[in-house]
Image: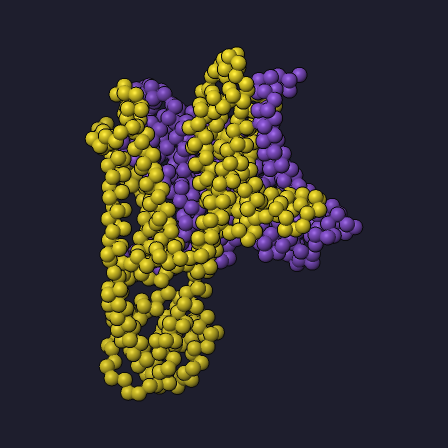
Amino acid sequence: MKSESLLIRLGLAFYLILFFTYLIGPLILMSITAFNSAAFPQVTPWEVLSFEWFPKLFNDARIISGLKYSVIVGFFTVILSVSMGLAGALLLTQVWPKMRATYYTIIIAPILVPGVVIGISTLVFWARINSMLGFAPDSFLANGIFLTVLGQSTFIASYCMLVFVARLQRYDTGLTEAALDLGASHMMAFKRIQLPFLMPAMASSAVLAFLASFENYNTTIFTHQKFATLTIVLSQKVRYGIDPSISALAFIIVCLTVFFALLNEVIKRRKQLAIANGAPIEAVSKGFKLPSFFSGSPVAIMFAIFVAGAVAVIVFAQVYDPEPAKQAFQETKRAKQKIAIEAMQQKARDKQREKQMKGPKIFESKDRKKPGENPGQETFGSVFKTDNLEQAAGATGQSEEPVGTNPGKGAFGSIWQSGNLNKIAPKEKESGSN
Amino acid sequence: MILKDYFKTNGPLMGWILLGLTFFWIVMLIVLPQLYMFELSFHPHLPPPEMGGPNDYLTLENYKYLVFGAEGNPDGYNKVDLAVFVRTLTAAAFVTVVDLLLCYPIAYYLGQSTGGGFVRLLVLLLIIPYWINEILRAFAFKIIFGDSGVLNEFLMFFAIIDGPIDFIRANVALYAGLGYAYILLMIFPIYNVVESLDRNQIEAARDMGAPWWMIHKRIVIPYAKPGISSGCTMVFMLSAGALAAPQILGGPSSLWFTQLVYQWFNTGGNWPQAAAYAIVLLIACLIIVLGVMKLFKVNMGDIGK
């Protein structure tokens, strides 16, 4: 019996580790790539620790304008979807009971409808309204921000509605009735009694709505027109050519998320502790008591470590200068390449002499596409392969003795010059990453 | 009169505001756009001035195209698009099942634990990836599964494989990314239900000698059914309707059905055709979800709890 429970525990621990590696691992790896000086987001091969991608990110005009539109869209979406969600939730208990199930199905449906469908339907419907009203094709009804707000609010309001319904289930309608009996108007009763009760739900649904709007892609891609939100800009960047400034952005977002999640947890924990100890909430939420802050909760300790780590990294980034290390790295890389290239030149010449081949033909593009048919593939094919220029160079460099003196330039001399390689490499990389 | 009672409880101003907002949401945002899109899918592709003109008529052309392809198609059927359609739905179902298998144990563990600091930490770790942008999550998987990605480098470093494996082309990256994106939507519905399960029931079953799998089969799973079906519905609908992950992680030859919709809409500029494809996707998903819910006897009202 005991051995069995031990086995189960071990299995559980193993499973938990695997699960959370799958969950957190990708985010950590992505964050690490933000600090690699390599031009392509990668962990291996690691080049030099560098913070250069952060300034590059902040100077990217498209990212900044995307951020701006995201905030504008998010702002209006929060207003519209929170108010619609609240209205929908308040009406839920008042709808004719027979209709209630249908009503609920209709307002919950947008969550399940694919975002693509919502995007298209919003766009075609409002384009039709626009032309029916006889407005110009570029009127505000066809404006990207207007359409995106409407499209996103369609389903985000459903999320908000769920939050409000959960809160309203605990509301005592007797309170509103009492207020009305005491002579308050309906508006006053709502404002003074029901709204304060709903305030926590308002706050959490607003946060939810903003985050949902901020990260929405499926609907926005159809409705945004020329107002590309941050998510749209990111998707374009990720699809057509990447550089690690995206990793830098991801790292910032991960940090912000962790920060607010931990902060939220700490605050919740403190309130719970206070209630458990019988103290009024105000006593604890006011006045910063350090000892109770750290008491017992690993989350609070993690929070402190996290903040300290962030500060340390920022300070270090100000002081640290990657240039010397980078130059050293470039030099070793160049030296390695040079050796490898010379070795390959020599090998190529030998081979050419053997086979009596016509040199330049090897480099025609059709030969490169089908390296299998190319007799010189072992030598040349790998050089042009998408991303392993350095690997191939390194491997060849190790396996063959570098040829010290190079008697003049052979048939390939100019082709092998490092400038040419640099020209070819980025092009190849692009086609490879698609 | 019902409306009179309604205005009595809410007051005229509040009553109209509530009605107006809900009306706008239901009619202008949910019902009419969907109906108009449905109607549009039965129209031929015309330039805007000709819409409603003599050339505008109701037709099944757009749906026919999905099944039979362009006229004079030698195959008889639109094999490419139909294959994409079937593959999207089966792959979405596959992702759903994998997510369920992956998430059920952890949801059960979290739901049944007494909730110490460690469990709170785990819940926190679960939530964090969910707030990271969808695009960035896909991007992270591209870094891992790319040709010179971490996984390939790792496997080659330990000499498990000789050359890089093309995970992108094999769609491994896509399935991993999709499954990853919706893990939380699977865990939380199950977690919420399992949390409310009385531990005494499990204790009682254990005391009477039931093995662990019997406890799950007879007690936990029947009890957690609403949560399980809710999670499965969400994951299935969202992965079938996903667009970003297939665009970023999909192989060059394997399309997702939403990508076809996107192509018709943006590249082709053919709105009615795109509408028809979108309708087919929506209806197919609804049929599958409602069918499965009927099969497992779960109500629509349980979704989203």
**Residue A356 in which image quadrant:** bottom left
Chain for colour purple? B
* Place of residue A301 in the rendered image (x, y in percent of width and height, measured from the top left): 24, 36
**Residue B203 in which image quadrant:** top left
Left or right, residue A2 beside residue A158: left
Chain for colour yellow? A
Work out whether B292 lies above or below A224. Answer: above
* Place of residue A417 in the rendered image (x, y in percent of width and height, measured from the top left): 35, 78
Work out whether B246 lies above or below A203. Answer: below
Query: In the image shown, does A234 or B192 lie closer to the viewer?
Result: A234
**Residue B213 in which image quadrant:** top left
The quadrant of the rendering that contains the N terminus of chain B is top right
* Place of residue A122 in the rendered image (x, y in percent of width and height, measured from the top left): 60, 43
Task: Identify the residue shown where x is 63% and y is 54%.
Answer: B269
State the count of labels.
0
Task: Identify the residue shown where x is 38% and y is 42%.
Answer: B129
Task: Identify the residue shown where x is 26% and y is 29%.
Answer: A287
Left or right, residue A279 beside residue B33: left
Task: Identify the residue shown where x is 52% and y is 12%.
Answer: A181
* Place of residue B46 in the rendered image (x, y in percent of width and height, measured from the top left): 71, 53
Asked whether the viewer can see residue B116, the reply is no
Query: In the image shown, does B110 or A128 lie closer to the viewer?
Result: A128
Query: In the image shown, does A138 or A409 lie closer to the viewer?
Result: A138
